Image: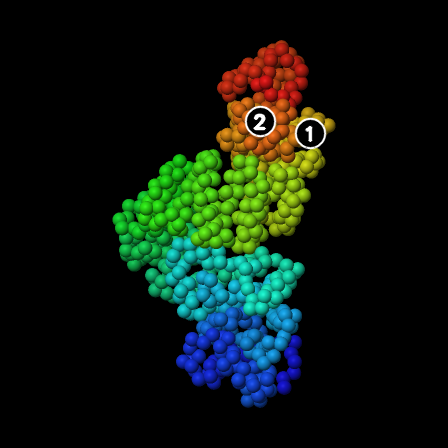
């Protein structure tokens, strides 16, 4: 017998081929599952010793050379075809240059099949965990590529869990036939998104229900289903990209190479990596052009050009470039309805991206009518058009239309695509934002929580989509007054930002959110510090006149004048000098609060800013007209007579200068400037300061219209 090693024993890859021949060859095993091979061949083969196959071989001097320390753990499903599993391993280890060195821990061979029925859950869980941890390398067999059986089996999910907790190397393998299907299917729009929508480890099953319960308890105790799914998502995506890139490098025919670049564009698209989509689509177009293939000749070239059109605007190409691409595509005669909808929806997204919302909605309404007629109401293209219409309406602040489109879209997606499909997540996210803006915070919270969970599972905690979901969820917590939940969500992200700097947009977004959070909590010191940091960062990193800088400065201005902090005199605060200096050079001729909208009318905030003094600070705010019309009651049932009122910064500073003036000549000059400003900005007479007023003009806590 072989002495027990530090790692468990396994069999070489060569043994799999030896076994196939010993069982009568591939023809004999053709069509048999791994389970059938186990019961029909492995169990009889080891009957004489009633050992596992590995121990059986190790006890036989003539077969012992096939056995040594395992260096790869194979995760697979017993329902897989045995020969396809072997082919997958052959392909993987050959590509890795490890075909001669691979020694595999394969549960059918390593576990004693004569006693398997008698082992309790604890035996299996400890065996799989200790063996995998000792080996340190896992390869999972993926069949079929677009709905892998292995990911629906809880024991395989358990193996991924062990890989996560033990930080083992995790790879995937696929048979050549499955790889061919992958490339073929990936040429279809949304193929990868459809596949990713099927992955949810928490929905996996076992033959013995109690095993599933035990596995799930272990996962919840030591990690999370989110972490397990995240490893699967990232491994699938990375593996596909590596495999396609390797195939391109191996020297393919130009058309096959073009198809693989199209597949790469699809992968990059699911990651929202516009620059990589543009590069892959551009290379595919060049290859098609080298073969003198036109869009009228090849439907896949239409997809390439659609990717190119949509990514062109995202990477800053001139409008004429991407408009020409889309107009040329739409001029093609004979496009099938689904492809035509795909092109038109991509065009609408590009138009939305450059804020041509009216044009985008008009285009999408035409597309929707066509899709209903040619494809029906419950077709992916029709549903995608609903989503585009919802987006255009949202961007136009037409929330009534937007919520109708998105609700209809979500209902269809849940039925056709499932809850975790990326398109469903996208719709749910926008629906949550509309609910938020309409004051339906409880529904918004539920939707944002669902979105945040799926985004983290798919993309990981640091992906921009996950960050945005976390920011929106925390903002909803703040509006609901659940400051502890917002803090618990945001502070770990902020700690990660200190250790690993994120994208600039993520950093300043969270910095500003934390300033708002501590303002709402009534923490003057922390709120002021985060406000100072926000303004300093914007002034340092953003160009002059940037709306984010103005938004930060305006918020800081209101923070310092908030009656809640009346004990802190802003005039004696060094921070106030920064605000005065900013508005002395910026927003000199406008009463618009940049990057802010009124919750009542969804239009840009202009003129007096009204905000409930009972609700969280910097939450629902209204223009004078909406407050007069009673629109605040949709969001807040507190008496409007106690609302805080902020004067636009430039007007307020002009009024303060009038009060501080010490000579008649200076006052007269300032008065002319003030009157000119009020006339230019159509400030109502009852809001204007009286000439004779020499009393300090504080932040108003009254209604000028009452």
Q: Where is residue 659 in the image (x, y as percent from the top left)?
A: 64, 16
Marker disc for residue 66: none
Residue drawn where x is 39% and y is 60% of the image = 185
Q: Name the residue carrying label 2.
A: 609
Q: How crowded is mark 1: few (under 14 residues within 10 Å), some or many (20 or more)?
A: some
- The answer to whether residue 313 is above or below residue 593 is below
Dividing the image into 4 quarters, which one contains the C terminus? Answer: top right
Q: Position of residue 4 (x, y in %)?
A: 65, 80
Query: Furthest residue to the left?
Result: 333
Q: Name the residue carrying label 1.
A: 564
Dividing the image into 4 quarters, which one contains the N terminus? Answer: bottom right
- The answer to whether residue 118 is above or below residue 252 is below
- In three-dimensional space, the C-alpha distance between marks 2 and 1, rounded to whole angstroms, equals 16 Å
Q: How crowded is mark 2: few (under 14 residues within 10 Å), some or many (20 or more)?
A: many
Left or right, residue 657 beside residue 419: right
Q: Position of residue 611 (x, y in %)?
A: 60, 29
Residue 99 visible from this viewpoint: no
Q: Nearer the viewer, residue 340 or 691?
A: 340
- The answer to whether residue 456 is above or below residue 103 is above
Residue 166 lies in quadrant: bottom right
Residue drawn where x is 56% and y is 16% of the image = 686
């Amino acid at each position: 017998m072989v002495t027990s090693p530090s790692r468990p024993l396994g069999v070489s890859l060569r043994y799999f081929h030896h076994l196939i021949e010993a069982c009568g060859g591939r023809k004999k095993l053709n069509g048999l599952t791994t389970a059938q091979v186990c019961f029909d061949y492995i169990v009889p083969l080891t009957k004489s010793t009633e050992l596992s196959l590995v121990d059986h071989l190790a006890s036989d001097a003539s077969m012992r050379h096939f056995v040594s320390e395992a260096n790869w753990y194979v995760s697979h499903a017993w329902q897989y075809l045995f020969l396809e599993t072997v082919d997958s391993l052959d392909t993987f280890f050959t590509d890795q240059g490890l075909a001669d060195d691979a020694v595999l821990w394969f549960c059918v061979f390593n576990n004693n099949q004569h006693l398997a029925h008698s082992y309790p859950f604890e035996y299996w869980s400890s065996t799989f965990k200790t063996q995998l941890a000792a080996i340190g390398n896992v390869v999972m067999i993926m069949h079929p590529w677009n709905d892998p059986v292995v990911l629906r089996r809880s024991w395989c999910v358990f193996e991924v869990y062990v890989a996560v907790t033990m930080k083992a190397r995790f790879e995937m393998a696929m048979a050549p036939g499955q790889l061919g299907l992958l490339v073929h299917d990936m040429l279809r729009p949304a193929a990868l998104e459809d596949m990713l929508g099927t992955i949810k480890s928490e929905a996996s099953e076992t033959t013995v229900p109690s095993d599933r319960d035990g596995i799930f308890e272990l996962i919840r105790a030591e990690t999370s289903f989110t972490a397990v799914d995240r490893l699967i998502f990232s491994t699938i995506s990375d593996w596909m990209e590596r495999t396609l890139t390797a195939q391109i490098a191996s020297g393919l025919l130009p058309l096959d190479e073009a198809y693989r670049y199209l597949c790469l564009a699809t992968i990059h698209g699911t990651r929202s990596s516009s620059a990589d989509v543009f590069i892959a689509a551009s290379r595919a177009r060049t290859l098609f052009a080298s073969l003198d293939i036109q869009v009228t000749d090849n439907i896949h070239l239409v997809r390439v050009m659609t990717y190119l059109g949509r990514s062109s605007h995202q990477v800053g190409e001139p409008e004429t470039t991407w408009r020409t691409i889309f107009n040329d595509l739409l001029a093609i005669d004979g496009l099938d309805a689904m492809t035509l909808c795909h092109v038109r929806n991509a065009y609408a997204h590009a138009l939305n991206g450059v804020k041509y919302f009216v044009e985008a909605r008009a285009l999408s309404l035409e597309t929707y009518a066509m899709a209903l007629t040619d494809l029906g109401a419950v077709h992916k293209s029709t549903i995608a058009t609903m989503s585009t219409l919802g987006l255009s309406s949202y961007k136009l602040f037409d929330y009534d239309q937007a919520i109708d489109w998105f609700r209809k879209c979500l209902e269809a997606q849940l039925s056709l695509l499932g809850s975790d499909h990326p398109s469903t997540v996208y719709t749910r996210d926008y629906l949550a934002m509309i609910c938020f803006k309409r004051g339906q915070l409880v529904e918004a919270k539920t939707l944002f929580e669902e979105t945040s969970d799926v985004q983290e599972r798919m993309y990981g905690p640091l992906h921009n989509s996950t960050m945005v979901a976390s920011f929106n969820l925390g903002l909803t917590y703040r509006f609901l007054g659940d400051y502890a939940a917002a803090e618990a969500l945001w502070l770990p992200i902020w700690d990660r930002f200190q250790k690993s700097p994120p994208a600039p947009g993520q950093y300043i977004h969270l910095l500003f959110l934390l300033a708002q959070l501590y303002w709402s909590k009534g923490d003057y010191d922390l709120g002021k510090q985060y406000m100072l940091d926000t303004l300093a960062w914007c002034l340092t990193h953003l160009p002059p006149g940037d709306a984010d800088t103005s938004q930060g400065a305006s918020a800081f201005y209101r923070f310092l004048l908030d009656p809640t902090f009346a004990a802190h005199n802003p005039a004696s605060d060094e921070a106030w000098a920064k605000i005065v200096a900013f508005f002395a050079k910026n927003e000199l001729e406008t009463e618009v609060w940049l990057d802010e909208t009124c919750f009542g009318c969804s239009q840009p905030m202009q003129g007096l800013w009204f905000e409930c003094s009972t609700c969280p600070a910097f939450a629902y705010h209204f223009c004078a007209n909406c407050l007069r019309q009673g629109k605040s009651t949709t969001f807040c049932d507190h008496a409007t007579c106690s609302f805080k009122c902020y004067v636009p910064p430039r007007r307020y500073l002009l009024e303060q200068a009038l009060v501080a003036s010490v000579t008649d000549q200076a006052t007269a000059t300032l008065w002319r400037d003030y009157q000119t400003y009020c006339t230019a900005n159509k400030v109502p007479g009852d809001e204007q300061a009286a000439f004779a007023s020499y009393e300090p003009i504080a932040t108003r806590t009254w209604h000028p219209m009452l």
